[in-house]
Image: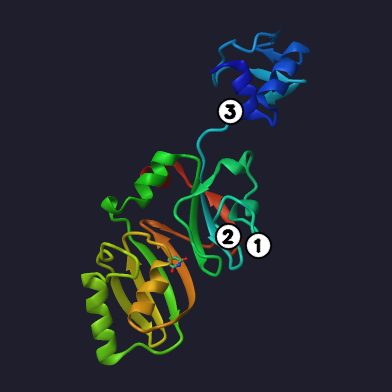
Amino acid sequence: MRLDRFLCETTDLTRSLAKKALHREEVRVDGGIIKNPATQVDAHCRVTWNGHSLALVGLRYVLLHKPEGVECSARRGLYPLVRELIDLPHVERLQTVGRLDVDTTGLVLLTDDGQWSHRVTSPKRRWGKVYEVTLAEPLEGAALDDAVTRFAEGLLLDGEEKPTRPAELAMRSPHVAKLTLHEGKYHQVKRMFAAIGHHVVALHRESIGPLFLGELAPGEWRELTEDEMAMF
Ligand code: URA
């Protein structure tokens, strides 16, 4: 890539500030001062700016335990953003892979790799997302049998043209359900339970495909391993 672009990617410099830094002879490539912004460099070049080594950041894959009261969006509104919990360079480039509501807790993935994100979320790949759902009222007996069938067959939610994809419902206790979805419509879990007359009081995502929260406490995060990333 061009040297001025490399400087933008690896520092907070804008393209015009990068050009000025080059003009002021602050940048060296493999030991020599370079002033031409169009000079081609790659990850093997040793680039320094004012003596500091610069390295290209590769694509990043982050697994976060989202706490309550934090927002998955890209722009700051009422709540802090999930990105603000993550201490990585150029964190603003990370996008969440799907979203959780502000009051939902649990597993969130973030990446700057758009193709990978698509592979994780595409309904065609059928990766299961497992939620623990706490209900205001107990769900049992014939109502439970009916809910299991309706979720398995697919429900038409308000404002949607297609029914939900088959989902698996099981109860851990009369108030606590385990729901596995293979897609991610807006407020899907809450809307599915509302469609069968139940109100969700707490929602927690436990896993996406083969990825689980493990030992991560709310607010903690880690980068995925190469093997985990390659599973999608
Ligand atoms: N479904 C919801 O209703 N909310 C979430 O945060 C995730 C899935």
Task: Say whether residue 122 is left or right of residue 45.
Answer: left
From the image, state whether disc 2 or disc 3 is nearer to you. Answer: 2
Looking at marks 1 and 2 on the same chain, the residue that comes earlier in the sequence is marked by: 2
For residue 229, which quarter of the picture? top left
Q: Is mark 1 within 8 Å of ligand 1?
A: no
How far, Cα to Cα, is label 1 from label 2?
Answer: 9 Å
For residue 118, which quarter of the picture? top left
Residues marked 3 and 1 touching at CB (< 8 Å): no
- The location of residue 16, given as percent across then percent down, is 69, 21
For ligand 1, give the image quadrant: bottom left
Which numbered marker is on residue 56? 3
Residue 64 visible in the snapshot:
yes
Residues marked 1 and 2 touching at CB (< 8 Å): yes
User: Is residue 174 or residue 160 the one in the foreground?
Assistant: 160
- The location of residue 23, given as percent across then percent down, is 75, 11
Dot 2 falls on a residue whose secondary structure is loop
- The location of residue 166, given as percent across then percent down, is 24, 66
Looking at marks 3 and 1 on the same chain, the residue that comes earlier in the sequence is marked by: 3
Q: Residues within 10 Å of mark 1 (few under 14, many from 20)?
A: few
Which numbered marker is on residue 196? none
Q: Which residue is mark 1?
A: 78
| Residue at the spot 27% in from the left edge and 91% down from the top edge | 141
Instruction: Name the image colouring.
Output: rainbow
Q: Amino acid at mark 3?
A: Leu
| Residue at the spot 55% in from the left edge and 21% down from the top edge | 43
| Residue at the spot 56% in from the left edge and 12% down from the top edge | 40
Q: Amino acid at mark 1?
A: Leu
How far, Cα to Cα, is label 3 from label 1?
Answer: 33 Å
Dot 3 falls on a residue whose secondary structure is loop
Task: Say whether residue 57 is left or right of residue 205.
Answer: right
Residue 232 visible in the snapshot:
no
Q: Amino acid at mark 2?
A: Glu
